[in-house]
Amino acid sequence: MVEIIPAILESEFSEIEKKIRFVDGLVSWVQIDLADGELVANTTFSDPAPFKNLKTSLNLELHLMVKDPLRYVERFAASGFKRFYAHVEGEYVEEYIAKCYELGVEVGLAIDGPTDFGKIHPYLDNIDCVLVMAITAGESGRPFREDTVEKIQKIREIDFEIPIAVDGAMDPTNAAKVVTAGANRINSNSYIFGSPDVKIAIEKLKAL
């Protein structure tokens, strides 16, 4: 079964809160994207404090598009985040993995669209899940990278059971490609929140 996880990339907490309300009750998880302007070009809202008082039934995961994930993991875990993806292109990858285990949260690694599979291969035995970017990380609305399919297949060949999420350009057409390749989580921003009816958009992705 394919799990649909709406992805939210915003610079204001009010916008994050509004989008969470749109999807609350329609899915189980929501992803908050955090960018520091160093690993990727843009920046987003990065204060964990408001999430402590967020009224939602959704589980929260954090996509850390940051150079140093250790600056954020502990504080966001304290604010209720249960799953983390730091980028394999960032720093302190092994320390980040150890910190997540120490905190008792799900530990994931993300791999950017242009990055070769070999970069994440050594870590697959030590993490709970993988996030494959089907675009270049940092901005919504970029075109789908066809080489994403091969990257997913290589991960799946090594580990039959690890959850593989894919983020970026995840409309029904591209999502179908990555699900066929072995992905079982679809993280979607532009398609879901840019649709006239968020519920119908989610249902179309769930139908995969």
Image (tube, rainbow, N blue to C red):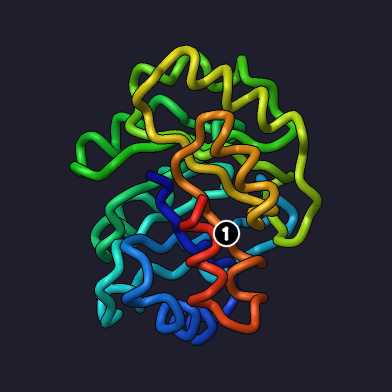
203, above or below 173, in the image: below
Describe residue 195's horizontal placement relative to residue 136 as left or right: left
Q: Which residue is drawn at 37% across and 44% down?
A: 1
Q: Position of residue 24 (x, y in %)?
A: 35, 77
109, above or below 36, in the image: above
88, above or below 27, in the image: above
Where disc 1 sits, the SS reads strand
* Residue nearest the viewer, comparing 78 with 83: 83
Describe residue 46's horizontal placement relative to residue 178 as left or right: left
Q: Position of residue 96 (x, y in %)?
A: 38, 35
| Total numbered labels placed on residues in the image | 1
Q: Dot 1, crowdedness within 10 Å: few (<14), some or many (≥20)?
A: many
User: Can residue 34 be seen in the rendering of this structure?
Assistant: no
Q: Residue at x 49, y 63 (%)?
A: 6
* Residue nearest the viewer, comparing 189 with 35: 189
Describe residue 184's horizontal placement relative to residue 82 as left or right: right
Q: Where is residue 50 in the image (x, y as percent from the top left)?
A: 35, 78
Q: Position of residue 181 (x, y in %)?
A: 58, 29
* Residue nearest the viewer, comparing 136 with 48: 136
Residue type (three-letter) at the residue carrying disc 1: Ser
> To which residue does mark 1 refer?
188
Q: Which residue lies furthest to the right in this view?
A: 143
Residue 37 in which image quadrant: bottom right
Residue 171 in which image quadrant: bottom right
111, above or below 125, in the image: below
* Residue nearest the viewer, comparing 30 with 77: 30
Q: Residue at x 51, y 39 (%)?
A: 131
User: Can residue 126 be seen in the rendering of this structure?
Assistant: yes
Q: Residue at x 20, y 36 (%)?
A: 102
